[in-house]
Amino acid sequence: MQTPVSVQDKKSFIRWFLNHYQLKKRESVWILNYIVNYPNLLENTHFVREAKYCPRGLIITSQCSEDVPFRFYKKQLVTTDAEKSFHDIRMNRQDSLYIQLNFKKSHQNSRYAAVLEENPFISDDYFITNHDKDAAKQILDFTIYTYRRTVLEKRIDYALDKRDRHTFFDLVDQLNHVDNSRLNQPDF
């Protein structure tokens, strides 16, 4: 479970963000300044990735990013009208608000990471693609193959040292079986 981010940390981050980035929509500045001035609203504000999946999400973008300038999501409705968004935020301060900020190198920014929370509305495997799953499976299969092969080779060497022909031939058959099963699998 993630530790909640304090109101003071959120306030400090928003002030830092507004001092260091120029936003694509000037209304975004007004909204962030409004949020900073209301502690109960700030307490219900959460910085997340992929805010579009949240019941009440806000996407704000700086000039240095190629992403959409502004989006407000409320349930299934989406708007680019910052004034309507501001009105909703002002009238529903007690409701959770999830904010995604798009700015250059946001994924590498330690200040943003300090206030960033896990998005509770995204499933665990949202960020995992089929390609990632296939690659992980191939790595796991190769690791298991390598381990089995190494163990069998050590046991074969031991059988040779003991001059145990029966065990030696049995282990060589097992090694051939492991190698043949590996031939049917793609390399990663």
Image (tube, rainbow, N blue to C red):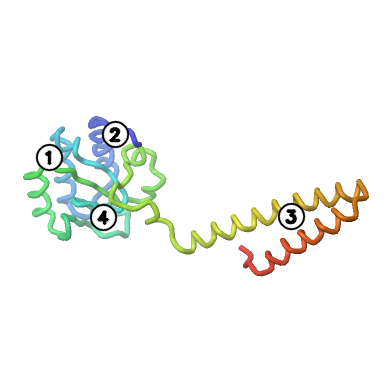
Question: Which label belongs to residue 124?
Answer: none
Q: Which residue is mark 2?
A: 4
Query: Is residue 29 toward the left or the right of residue 131 in the image?
Result: left
Q: Which residue is rendered at x = 32% and y = 54% of the image?
A: 64
Answer left or right for 147 relative to 97: right
In the image, which disc is placed on residue 94? 1
Q: CA distance from mark 4 to mark 2?
A: 20 Å
Tell me how far mark 4 sits from mark 3, CA to CA.
Answer: 46 Å
Mark 4 vs mark 3: give the one in front.
3
Do labels 2 and 1 touch, CB within 8 Å? no
Q: Position of residue 137 (x, y in %)?
A: 55, 59
Q: Which residue is mark 3?
A: 149
* Quadrant in which the N terminus appears: top left
Q: Secondary structure at mark 2?
A: loop
Does the CB distance between marks 4 and 3 fall below 8 Å? no
The x and y percentages for residue 75 are 17, 56
Residue placed most toward the observer, 184 or 51: 184
